[in-house]
Image: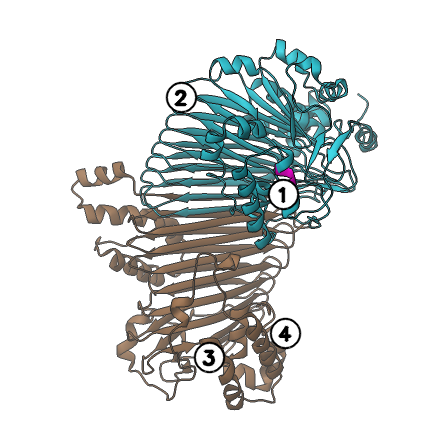
Chain colours: A cyan, B brown
């Protein structure tokens, strides 16, 4: 067997780095750089928004102005210059499409490259996709099928126009405008995103999916997702992201709000693969995201995430377990390589009685990257019989990376049962030796072991995503042997 | 006038009392400057997120006790581990009490910080060790350094085993309406040497006492240090205990903290491993109720390969008590082959009690085995039922289970008389008489 040397790896790395790093030449309508009240008004006007929405944004902007950028996370990065970003960029063609035939063919090509062939999916996969490019929703598939069930799945700007009562009722209830610096910024300038409403007692027949892509240079992406599952309903929601390769750092500050009313269940899966920067740590996306879900009585929210991209990730999908017997789950794999930094984890706030939460977090760091888990489990005095189990495991590859764990556990009720355990280790030489002995080369052996390490989380992903995530893991870790 | 201003303005008076010409003078002044800029920690600081000093700082403490107080031995006998032969160093209101103490200069030095600071024969040791590991940028530590004058000085030369354990007892009489104490201890254990130390802070009345103590421990190559802290003070007493341990190759150091009393207790326990094949152990049992607050803040810094560290903290919290565990394991890039364990188990007895636990790992080396675990729960109802069904009353049954919970920490106490004493303290605390010792 010819030995797969490190040089071979390096070569392969150079050629096979980030396959989504292309740029689509689509004319786009971009606002000038900078941020002030006029820009916020301009965004609102471009979106043809009603007065209340404009005011809501302006209020958020005023809050944002008063806030300071947080720096408590275990990451280092040049602070973005918020006046040097364009806050609106839209593909400059007709904004609405009735069917796929009307979509710009170049755009369709882009999706082909991304592996989301809309045509094919329409026929086979049964996944409804909402594609957001440079923060504007370009296409939503399967709308009619969904509409028959009473499910609303559209871009958020469309929802503001057509379902203002729902948006007004729920927007900003889980992540208020003054929640944090990036949430306030997002509330002021968000240009689009997805909105989803599942009516009472409906089980959504297919996976709903949003694909995000930053295309234009010098822009930031600020999308807003709002998912409302009415009583006794169920929805599984997928989210994927990619961006072109650029030397500059691009900012992505999204807000995701989930609301699960009594007996509802929301499953939210993310495969995040923003451009992570090159092997010297140049460029890449700053991913500062606020994701939070609210559970009413007997509701369940489950977050699953695979984080392989972004230069800097700063993300804590959380559950507020407000209702009695509600359940929160968090399954995460975060992979960092080269100079990537990730500070990610979750918050489980137990308010209701008999609430339950599970946290499984797997961190894999390679190269010169830093990977942190930061989580909060809070049991409030009213939350009788709350139960939490947390497990965070870290895998280190090479001796230049770091793995960190910062769990916060706050308990104010005696009937609570809280467990937390964490381990940090490397791939054992004997494990690799065992594989080598059986004719599996080192590279494959590592992929195998990493796969086993992540299995618990990968199993939680819907089929289509699990395959993609597995592939992503392999690509992200290439070249980290030794 | 706030306590901070008061301390700063009384520093000059303090300086005049002590020998100004000494080298320590520069260290003190520098430390005071740092305290002036840092001040007391607030809840805004990450390490103090769960512990506020506000309730302590509002008292009007006297910083220098006006007159020397004397106490009869029989009044305080119960605070000594009197059934063993030990060297004892006793301070009353921060002032050395010669008639209660038994110091030594035979083979080992177990004496006073004040004489170590003044006498030329200790100059070399002081230059090498004094204020060398306590971080100079920490406000509380700087405050102690600025006012450092008295405390225990223990020096075990190379190749010596201390023949008896050493007890350090800080008593406060309550002759002042409110008193602030700043003991400063230095423990230097030479190569191949061994020592066991027991430390206790005790106030004799209900007048408020605020102690900001700093202890520096140096364990040279192959040294063995066993340090026991007993914290069972009155509800008017608060303690901030800053302990820094510097360990060289193949040394073994353990610090056991038993926190049963006091209004607010904060233990800052920091281990710095500066060599290979080092073993560090941190154990603690906390049993508190009422409105008591105990905060364990630990750090183990692994900077060299092939070392181990073990942390095991158990807590039982009743009423409105608040427990905090904030542990950190830091592993440097070159520190391969490290085994670090951290465990924090808690039992909540009451609905109003709170536990905040934050076991952290910061790891930069890949070939390590680090793990931490944290649990919060209650006594097992089935186990309770089992005991009750065999005729053991509910109170005793609960106490038995709590003993069992804390047992592996108690087991690690190496002085039998001390173990007995701690057993008794726990029995008192739980208000039971089991009729046997564990």
Q: Nearer the viewer, mark 4 or mark 3?
A: 4
Q: Is the residue under label 2 in contact with that under label 3 (CB below 8 Å)? A: no
Q: Nearer the viewer, mark 3 or mark 1?
A: 1
Residue B143 place in picture, x, y as percent: 52, 74
Of the two numbered discs 3 and 2 in the rendering, the one whose residue sits closer to the viewer: 2
Q: Would you place residue B84 above or below residue A104 in this image?
A: below
Pointer 4 and pointer 1 on the same chain: no
Q: Secondary structure at mark 1?
A: helix
Give the class, few, some or many, for how many residues have Cα within 10 Å of label 4's Cα (few <14, many ≥20).
Answer: few
Query: Do the dots labelled 1 and 2 sit on one chain?
Result: yes
- Closer to the N terminus: mark 4 or mark 3? 3
Q: Can residue A323 be seen?
A: yes
The answer to whether A252 appears left or right of B428 in the picture is right
Frontmost residue, A330 versus B231: A330
Q: Nearer the viewer, residue A323 or A430?
A: A323
Q: Chain under label 1?
A: A
Q: Which stretch did the figure color magenta?
A: A40-44
Q: Chain of mark 4?
A: B
Give the residue displayed 49% in from the left and 75% down from the top. B184
Q: Residue B263 occupies which quadrant of the picture?
A: bottom left
Disc ID at residue A200:
2
Report helix, strand or loop for mark 4. Answer: helix
């Amino acid at each position: 067997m010819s030995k797969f040397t490190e040089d071979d790896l390096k070569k392969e790395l150079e050629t096979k780095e980030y396959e989504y790093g292309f740029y689509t030449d689509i004319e786009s309508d971009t606002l000038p750089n900078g941020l002030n009240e006029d820009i916020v008004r301009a965004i609102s006007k471009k979106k043809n928004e009603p007065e209340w929405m404009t005011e809501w944004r302006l209020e958020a902007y005023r809050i944002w102005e008063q806030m300071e950028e947080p720096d408590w996370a275990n990451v280092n990065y040049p602070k973005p210059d918020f006046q040097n970003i364009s806050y609106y960029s839209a593909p400059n063609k007709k904004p609405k499409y009735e069917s796929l035939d009307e979509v710009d063919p170049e755009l369709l090509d882009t999706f082909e490259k991304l592996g989301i062939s809309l045509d094919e999916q329409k026929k086979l996969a049964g996944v409804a996709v909402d594609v957001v490019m440079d923060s504007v929703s370009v296409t939503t598939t399967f709308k009619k099928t969904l509409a028959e069930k009473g499910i609303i799945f559209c871009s958020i700007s469309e929802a503001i126009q057509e379902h203002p009562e729902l948006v007004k009722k729920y927007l900003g209830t889980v992540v208020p405008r003054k929640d944090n610096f990036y949430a306030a910024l997002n509330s002021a300038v968000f240009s689009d995103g997805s909105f989803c409403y599942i009516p009472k007692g409906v089980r959504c027949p297919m996976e709903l999916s949003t694909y995000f892509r930053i295309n234009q240079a010098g822009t930031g992406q600020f999308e807003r997702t709002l998912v409302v599952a009415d009583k006794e309903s169920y929805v599984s929601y997928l989210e994927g992201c990619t961006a072109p390769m650029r030397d500059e750092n691009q900012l992505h500050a999204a807000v995701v709000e989930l609301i699960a009313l009594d007996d509802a269940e929301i499953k939210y899966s993310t495969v995040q693969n923003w451009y992570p920067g090159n092997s010297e740590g140049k460029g890449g996306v700053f991913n500062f995201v606020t994701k939070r879900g609210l559970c009413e009585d007997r509701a369940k929210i489950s977050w699953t995430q695979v984080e392989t991209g972004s230069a800097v990730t700063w993300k804590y999908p959380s559950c507020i377990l407000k209702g009695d017997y509600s359940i929160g789950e968090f399954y995460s794999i975060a992979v960092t390589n080269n100079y990537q930094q990730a500070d990610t984890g979750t918050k489980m706030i137990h308010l209701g009685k008999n609430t339950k939460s599970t946290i499984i977090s797997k961190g894999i760091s390679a190269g010169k990257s830093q990977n942190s888990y930061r989580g909060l489990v809070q049991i409030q005095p009213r939350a009788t019989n709350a139960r939490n189990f947390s497990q965070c495991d870290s895998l280190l590859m090479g001796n230049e990376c770091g793995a960190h764990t910062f769990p916060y556990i706050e308990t104010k009720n005696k009937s609570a049962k809280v467990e937390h355990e964490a381990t940090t280790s490397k791939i054992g030489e004997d494990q690799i030796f065992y594989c080598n002995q059986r004719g599996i080369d080192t590279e494959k052996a590592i992929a195998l072991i990493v796969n086993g390490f992540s299995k618990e989380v990968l199993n939680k992903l819907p089929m289509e995503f699990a395959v993609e995530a597995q592939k992503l893991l392999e690509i992200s870790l290439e070249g980290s042997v030794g | 006038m706030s306590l901070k201003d008061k301390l700063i303005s009384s520093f000059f008076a303090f300086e005049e009392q002590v020998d100004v010409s000494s080298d320590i003078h520069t260290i003190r002044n520098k430390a005071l400057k740092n305290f002036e800029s840092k001040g007391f920690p607030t809840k805004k600081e990450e390490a103090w997120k769960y512990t506020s000093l506000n309730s302590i700082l509002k008292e009007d403490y006297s910083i220098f006790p006006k007159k020397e107080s004397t106490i009869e031995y029989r009044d305080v006998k119960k605070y000594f581990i009197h059934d063993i032969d030990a060297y004892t160093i006793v301070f009353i209101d921060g002032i050395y009490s010669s008639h209660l103490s038994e110091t030594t200069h035979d083979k080992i030095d177990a004496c006073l910080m004040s004489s170590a600071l003044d006498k030329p024969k200790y100059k070399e040791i002081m230059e090498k060790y004094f204020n060398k590991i306590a971080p100079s940028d920490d406000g509380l530590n700087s405050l102690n350094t600025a006012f450092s004058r008295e405390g225990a000085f223990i020096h075990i030369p190379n190749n010596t085993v201390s023949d008896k354990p050493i007890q350090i007892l800080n008593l406060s009489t309550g002759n002042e309406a409110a008193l602030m104490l700043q003991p400063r201890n230095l423990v230097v254990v030479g190569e191949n040497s061994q020592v066991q130390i027991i430390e206790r802070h005790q106030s004799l009345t209900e007048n408020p006492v605020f102690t900001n103590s700093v202890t520096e421990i140096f364990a040279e190559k192959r040294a063995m240090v066993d340090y026991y802290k007993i914290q069972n003070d009155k509800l008017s007493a608060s303690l901030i205990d800053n302990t820094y341990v510097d360990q060289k190759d193949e040394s073994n150091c353990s610090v056991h903290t038993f926190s049963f009393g006091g209004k607010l207790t904060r233990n800052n326990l920091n281990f710095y491993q500066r060599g290979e094949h080092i073993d560090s152990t941190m154990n603690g049992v906390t049993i508190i109720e009422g409105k008591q607050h105990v905060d364990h803040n630990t750090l183990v810094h692994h900077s060299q390969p092939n070392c181990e560290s073990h942390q095991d903290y158990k807590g039982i919290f009743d009423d409105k008590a608040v427990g905090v565990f904030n542990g950190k394991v830091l592993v440097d890039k070159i520190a391969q082959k490290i085994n670090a364990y951290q465990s924090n188990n808690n039992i909540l007895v009451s609905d109003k009690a709170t536990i905040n636990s934050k076991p952290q790992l910061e790891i930069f080396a890949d070939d390590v085995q680090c793990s931490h675990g944290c649990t919060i729960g209650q006594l097992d109802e089935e186990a309770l039922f089992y005991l009750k069904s065999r005729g053991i009353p509910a109170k005793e049954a609960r106490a038995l289970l709590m003993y069992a919970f804390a047992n592996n920490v108690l087991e690690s106490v190496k002085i039998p008389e001390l173990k007995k004493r701690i057993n008794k303290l726990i029995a008192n605390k739980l208000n039971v008489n089991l009729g046997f010792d564990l």
